[in-house]
Amino acid sequence: MTAALSLELIQRLPKTELHCHLDGSLRLATVLELARAQGVALPTFDAGELRGLLVAGETVASLEDYLRAFSITLSVLQREDALERCAYELAEDAWAEGVRYLEVRYSPLLHVQQGLAPTAVIDAVLRGLAAARRTYGIRTGLILSAIRTLGPEAALQIAQMCVAYKHRGVVALDLAGAEDGFPAKRYREAYALVAENNLNCTAHAGESYGAASIHQAIHLCGARRIGHGTRLVEDADLLDFVTDQRIPLEVCPTSNVQTRVAPSWRVHPLEFYLDYGVCVTINTDNRLMSETTASKELWGCVEAFGWGRERLEQVVMNGFEAAFLPWREKQELMRAVRREMQGI
């Protein structure tokens, strides 16, 4: 079934990227250039050694271990020009492999170590994304992430920023970071604020903690999508609810295997979810740390599960269906995508 498909063909297909962290998706060369320009003391300036510190491999023992590499990338993302550049480069890289709609997420509060105001952080990233759209035509949306370990008050601050930038490029609130010990219910006030202002919301859940995390994200916070959702399979009743309500999962296979959430590609529950009727989308999570692209993630699914063209296109269209876009704009984009795919 995989003979007619190839990574090259998948790179040509129009697709989405809905779960992509800015601070986990820098180019390695850019990290080095920014560090030198800013006088940041990296652990090493040898490209090979730095790659070994940033790219997750067999040494990663858990999600928390995986997240340690972000201290390096965040160290060079404390200036407006760096944020603008990296946002532009991420959109440029996505466009080059066929991504037509990209949602970038990050927490502005992690980029204020040198005195930047959180609004300046948001403005810089929006400038980079806007420049990429002018150059390439790629559509983008910005998701602001509340970090569990920073606490509910910081999450509410992020939610307030989401509301302030509702019509300026921010499309949703997210909740990220270590799940264990930081249940979603602690951040209900932040989610209530975005809901009251008719904004979308998603949440990392069911990644390093069980299905109860997903339950809280949906029923206590009102999440409209779930980041990862790998452990949804542990609660059959919740699985039915997610399926029936068409709540999309933002699945990131390589990342899930690297963080030991899934033992391997072949036993990842995403194929079961698709067979069951769940709206599964495939994403990168962190392009640098997972050394991947949206196309590589889809190709990995083709190889692991024997997908044919029909299944591949179904998952691609799931991404457009799940996008945090206005309905009319989404319908227009989906029609254009279908026409484009017919010609490939």
Image (spheres, grey):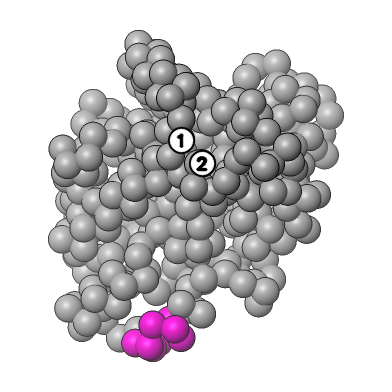
Quote the CA–CA distance across marks 1 and 2: 5 Å
> Which of the 4 image quarters holds residue 327?
top left
Which residue is rendered at x = 20% and y = 54% of the image?
Answer: 84
The answer to whether residue 189 is visible is no
Label 1: state its secondary structure.
loop
Residue 249 % position (x, y): 61, 34
Under circle 2, the secondary element is helix
- Magenta segment includes 158: no
In the image: residue 107, left or right of residue 290: left
Residue 131 in which image quadrant: top left
Q: Is residue 128 above or below residue 320?
A: below
Q: Position of residue 320 (x, y in %)?
A: 47, 26
Residue pointed to by mark 2: 10
| Residue 219 vs residue 24, the one in the foreground | 24
Amino acid beneath label 2: Ile
Q: Which residue is mark 1?
A: 13
Q: Which residues are magenta?
A: 43-50
x%, y% of residue 146? 44, 47
Front-lying residue, 1 or 234: 1
Based on the picture, tell me whether residue 44 belongs to the magenta stretch: yes
Amino acid found under the numbered disc labelled 1: Leu
Mark 1 touches mark 2? (CB < 8 Å): yes
Nearer to me, 134 or 34:
134
Q: Position of residue 246 (x, y in %)?
A: 62, 19
Residue drawn where x is 50% and y is 79% of the image: 53
